Image: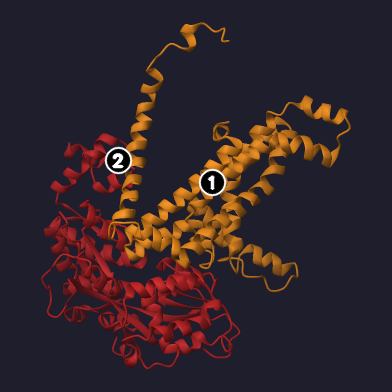
Chain colours: A red, B orange
Amino acid sequence: MTAFTKRNGLLRPTRRRFLQGTAAAGAAALSAPSIARAQSDVLYVNSWGGPWLEAATANLFEPFAEQTGIRVETVSPVSFAKLAAQVRTGVYEFDVTSLGGGDIVRANQAGLLEEIEPTYPDGLFENGMGSHAFATVLAWRTDTDWQETPQSWADFWDVDRFPGTRSLQRYPARIIPLALLADGVAPQDLYPLDIDRAFAKLDEIKAHITVWWTAGAQSAQILRDGEVDMIGIWHGNYFAAEDEGAPVAMTWNQAEIERAYWVVAKDTPNMEAAKAFVEFATSAEPLAGFVTQANYGALNPAANAFIADAAKPRMPTAPDTYPQTFEQDMLNFGADPEEVSMRFEEWLAS
Amino acid sequence: MSTAPRSLTDRPTLWPWLLLTPLALYLAIFFLVPLAQVAWMSVSEPTPGFGNYADALTGTLFRKVMLNTFFTAALVAFCCLLVGYPLAWLMTKTTPARATAILLLITMSFWTSFLVRTYAWMVLLGRNGPVAWAIEALGYGEPPQMLFTRFASTLAMVHILAPYMIMNIYSVMTKIDPALIRSAESMGARGGSLMRHVYLPLTAPGIANGAVLVFVICLGFYVTPVLLGSPREQMAAGLIGRQIEEFLAFGPGSAMAMILLAVTLVILAVYHRRFGLDRLYG
């Protein structure tokens, strides 16, 4: 049966299709999980989509398949809830995912992550292997009537000098440090965060934020289409908008750097392949290709030897750029991130 | 009373019930079992008891979102009626060919993906979209913020749900005996009076059915308000989704879902007492 179904895309026995409820034949789908468990030639990776996926496919998934014979299939979107649900139910939709600094602490505390061995020295953090750094940067439209260019988050808050609509991510762990910087806190004094002070500062800008973006592609779209004049946006999505010719500009000043980690879903049936993939994806050469294409900063220092100098200006960790930025410090957050998120949701609705 | 042969009407047979089993099984496996799981999670996680319900009902955010959800659903149902009633009436008055063409145009929107329709509104209502351009070109000055407001999300939901209203009203209107209208006219009813005392009451079942369908479907809307609306006007489905997605709060999220379901059932029960649910099936 397996030989037949592999050729036939519709009846391919995967637990994903079973979950999605799209399997044409109920009987085939019901018998699928056991078949899927037995096969180890496919690895399911949770995808961030967009530029991330393009770079990961070309530099990580395809070379990994060539080297090991294990094909990588992607599942999207990146979902923290799904990671938790898989461990609860034992039905795995993906074996490997990557998480940002805020989520990985939470995930590890909730026991959702498999213990892994470091694949390079000093790279292990909360059961995740450091992959790359990305940044939330200040970007704006250049077709406004402003006399000056914004330089800092204080300018983002300054609606008199820079009138217009704004957008930030609907994600308080990334937004609160920006509010504190705008309020005059020095980057080195940010953590632990003064949550009350941050919310007071957020009150000032709330009326000018027409949309709180929730997906990377959405943030690029609203900037490109001129839906907002100023935005806090991931640098990868910013460059995507710039490369499409939109009249936009950005600054690295006060960019907020966050590290992303590869993690293995706890107790996944595809353990060996999953761990092999994490080792491959964090090794110097594949990682170098990945970060070069997607403009990320490599966290494995050995990768830097394979990165051309020409690729560096767009990376948040480049020598000229890094000193202007600051890093998230989730272990020193200063409050229960979940309580802060709840408070943020209530604040948004009020 | 019945004059039909006994063998045709009252013969006890299991066949109709057997035919129902595939559907019943499907509903049991894919609807009732998961629903029971949700109900169970709402009282068992993170600790057993009704704490999740108490938290949800006393929390300001949930109450605000629930009120907004029911208000939005009622508003959308009302707007659907405003656009749907005249259109349905037009369909009964025009030639059958034109009525079919209108029906085709209305149902065509069903063939387009939900997401595509939502994104189409983003393009249309955007700051640099055609609507904003037209407002400026016509000399009304700076166009107002349309996207990410209640206006945008309501407009898109009315667009998506109006067909339900139109088809319900249309099906009732076509069944109205023209003799009734003629007799009313022969007795002197004209214009507004004819409408108020004869036509409107005759079409009331269609209005009630359409309104209930639109209202109930709208209660569960998720994508459209999130993408087009303002965060100050959240819908319950979005809030429940965020509970699960962001806070892994399966228990509280389930409790909110059960409350939403219970309130919806209460509304349907009230409707049933007033109009009879069986009319929903024509």
Q: Quadrant of residue B87?
A: top right
- The residue carrying mark 2 is A10
Residue closest to the eye, B201 or A71? B201
Q: Quadrant of residue B44?
A: bottom left
Image disc number at residue A96: none
Tag 1, which secondary structure? helix
Q: Amino acid at mark 1?
A: Ile
Check disc 2: other Cα within 10 Å, few if <14, some if 14-19, many if 20+: few
Q: Is residue A235 visible?
A: no
Q: Quadrant of residue A137?
A: bottom left
Q: CA distance from mark 2 to mark 1?
A: 42 Å
Left or right placement of residue B106 versus residue A244 in this view? right
Tag 2, which secondary structure? helix
Q: Nearer the viewer, mark 2 or mark 1?
A: 1
- The N terminus of chain B, quarter of image: top right
Q: Amino acid at mark 2?
A: Leu
Residue closest to the eye, B44 or A166? B44
Q: Residue at x 83, y 30 (%)?
A: B184
- The residue carrying mark 1 is B267
